[in-house]
Image (cartoon, rainbow, N blue to C red):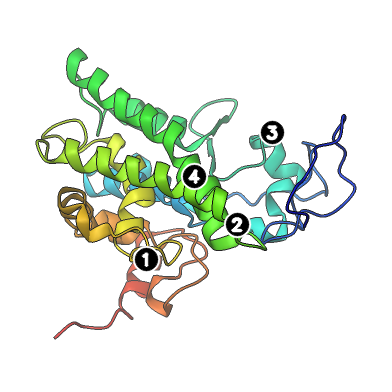
Amino acid sequence: MADNYTPPKVWTEDTESGGTWASINRPTAGSRHEKTLPVGEHSLQLYSMGTPNGQKVTIMLEELLALGVTEAEYDAYLIRIGDGDQFSSGFVAVNPNSKIPALVDHSQQPPLNVFESGNILLYLAEKFGQLIPQDFAKRTQMMNWLFWLQGSAPYLGGGFGHFYAYAPEKFEYPINRFTMETKRQLDLLDKHLADNTYLSGDEYTIADIATWPWYGNLVLGRAYDAAEFLDVESYPNLMRWAKQIDQREAVQRGRIVNKAWGEEWEQLEERHSAADIDAVLSKRPILK
């Protein structure tokens, strides 16, 4: 790759970009192969993968079930994004943007397609009246942080994560640029959480559920192998919040769904009942 790249007058895809996702990245939308999505017995059908965006929804569903919302029972099917499952005709019919997660609510007629992780959280919170403040001012504060996450996480994932962990070559400029922005975001969260138990105050909400899979996993050392590089221990309030949420049973259950890597006890490719999660977590080593 040339050190001094001059962009062409009109960009065309004439070479593969390289890197982890090069084989599936294209400048066009739409389906690439025919495949029907499976449908299980529950009203809520989730098609996803246990990435941070996928974990948002499975944690939300498990939190709802923990609250006694039996209508939140769901089937979760693994979409292997590295294999291009998100470009099947069935998936594109649910989410034309070909990104996980995607949800279909069969309790609505005709079945209702819901996509974009933040919108799925908001949909489920409003549908079941849980994990979203009813007070107008508190709800507004929560929405501030939910929308902050949706706008900020791409700088962490597609920016820092890509250039630090996945790019075929490491270049100083993009790594420095996105590291600076990531640390600014960590500092912002740390300062805010110095005076707040959760993101929108004393109430655990979908803003926390949206943010934890990205920034909680990061500071807990589960993303990009970058905890030391980012000096995450210098953000004690953020670390407290991350550990506090990590101890929630629903979070521990939701974060393993549609996950096909890691330790044996944190991999559950498909979920159709609580017993599926129980069986996997039973393999978790006992800490002495």
Residue positioned most to the front: 4
What residue is drawn where x is 16% and y is 40%? 193
Specify the amino acid type for callout 3: Pro
For the point 73% across and 53% down, the residue is 3
Q: Depth check: give the residue in front, 267 or 36.
A: 267
Name which residue lies at 23% across and 22% down. Answer: 141
Front: mark 3 or 4: 4
- The picture quadrant where one finds residue 152 is top left
Image mark for residue 277: 1
Q: Position of residue 20 (x, y in %)?
A: 66, 62
Q: Characterize the local packing of mark 4: few (<14), some (14-19) or many (20 or more) Cα atoms within 10 angstroms.
A: some
Per the model, the C-alpha gap separating discs 3 and 2 is: 33 Å
Q: Which amino acid does the dot numbered 1 rest on?
A: Ile
Sequence-earlier tag: 2 or 4: 2
Q: Which mark is residue 86?
A: none
In this picture, residue 175 sits left or right of residue 276: right
Q: Position of residue 119 (x, y in %)?
A: 45, 30
